[in-house]
Image (cartoon, rainbow, N blue to C red):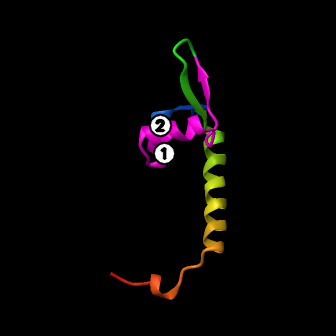
Amino acid sequence: MAAERFLQLTDVAEILNISSSQTYALVRSGELPAIKIGGRGQWRVERSVLEEYIQRCYHQTRAFVAAHPVRDEELVED
C-alpha cells in the first residue's frame, strides 16, 4: 500500500517526536505549511511538505552551529 499523501497533526507530532500542541503552533505560525479540509476544518500536512520542513530545520541547524562554535569549556564530560 502506498504511503498516504496527507498526515494528521497527531501523525506529524509523532514523526517529529513533539507534542500535538507544538505541532499545532508550528502550523498556526505558518512555519509548517498545512491545509484545512472538510466541514470541520481538519488540519492536514502534506508528507512532502513535512520532509521539506525537516530539511529546512537541518539547514538552519547547520547554519546555527557554524555561527556558534562550541567553546572548549562547553565540552565537559559528565
Q: Is residue 19 magenta?
A: yes
Dot 2, crowdedness within 10 Å: few (<14), some or many (≥20)? Answer: some
Q: Secondary structure at mark 2?
A: helix
Amino acid type at mark 1: Ile
Residue 15: which disc?
1
Question: Given the current orientation, which residue lies at the most extreme bottom position?
Answer: 72
Span shown in magenta: 12-37
Q: Secondary structure at mark 1?
A: helix
Q: Is residue 35 magenta?
A: yes
Q: x, y (%) of residue 33?
A: 64, 37
Q: x, y (%) of residue 48?
A: 65, 40
Mark 1 touches mark 2? (CB < 8 Å): yes
* Residue displayed at 59% across by 39% down: 29
State which quadrant residue 63 falls in: bottom right
Judge whether 60 appears above or below 14 on screen: below
Amino acid type at mark 2: Asp
* Residue displayed at 46% across by 82% down: 74
Residue 11: which disc?
2
Q: x, y (%) of residue 1?
A: 55, 31
